[in-house]
Amino acid sequence: MNKDLERLISLHDLDVMISDLQNKDIQKQEKKLGLSPAAAVEELKKMRGELALLIARRSRDMYDQLASHYGNAVVPVIHERCSGCFTQLPTAFVASPDRNKQVETCPACGRFIYWCD
Amino acid sequence: MKRPVFSDWNIKSVNRKAAIAELLKLFPFQSNTQDLLLTALETREQAEPTIVHKGIAMPHCRSILVDDFMIAIGKSEKGIPWPEEKVKVIILFITPVKPSGPDEHMKLIRHLAKLLRMDGAEKLLSADSPIEAASILKFTLQESKQNE
Ligand SMILES: [Zn+2]
């Protein structure tokens, strides 16, 4: 898999983690388990900053724009459709031998897409 | 909350990251996906070790790489440095990222928190088999060689 694509997926999962740990209900349950979600969020934000810097500037800026517009910037391809906007992907995309070998975006919504196992 | 779980009651790894990787290998993912999930779980552990009871760790996250709940329980007789405190039982789970939000993820955490705060944690630490552990957590064990 393309390294930047891997980092974009990791960035997405990290953003989800930060958002979850800022969710009041999840915070409450994590605290009941003896964890400190607020402190973890601060550390995760630092790690997010470091990870983002490893991603090519163009992809990073696009990620931020997509995340603020849609809420999610990276989505899997499921049944040959972008799972963000559910648009059927063109045959050339689906049949390409370069799946996940480069950073690809959905031609309809622009989200980063990747193929699952 | 009946959820299928994978198990490894004889974890051989001697450090946190390797132990998480060992449990992730139980899931039917390609190595690339396992690596990315390991990164996510280990990042959370670096931010704050998820020790939820003396001897029990709960690495967990939501990820776009899974489309259903993935749960694994593991035990190490010797204990694994996490990295300071030793952990003997691991409850690992990854839940999918859905448009509906983190509700299901939250419910699973609440379910586990409730069980562990009762007498679940002590029972789990003394469970002799993954079947017993799964039953304490009200999970259903997946059929696999690891469980025999
Ligand atoms: Zn799309």
Image (tube, rainbow, N blue to C red):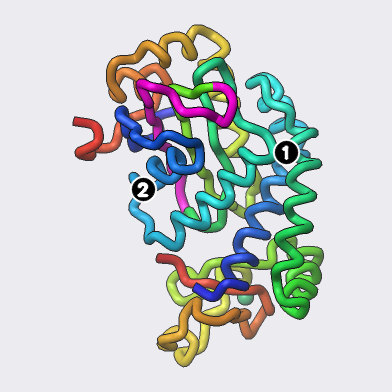
Quarter where residue A2 is shown:
bottom right
- Name the residue: 41% across, 86% down: A97
Could you tell me residue B100's position as x and y percent? 63, 49
Q: Which residues are magenta?
A: B67-85
Could you tell me residue B51's position as x and y percent? 59, 25
Task: Tell me the number on the disc at residue A21.
Answer: 1
User: Are discs 2 and 1 less than 8 Å apart at CB?
Assistant: no
Q: Residues within 10 Å of mark 2 (few under 14, many from 20)?
A: some
Left or right of B73 on screen, residue B81: right
- Name the residue: 50% across, 42% down: B17
Could you tell me residue B19's position as x and y percent? 43, 38
Observer-nearest of A26 and A61:
A61
Q: Indicate whether A106 appears above or below B9.
A: below
Q: Amino acid at mark 2?
A: Lys
- The residue under label 2 is B25
Quadrant assignment for the C terminus of chain A: bottom left
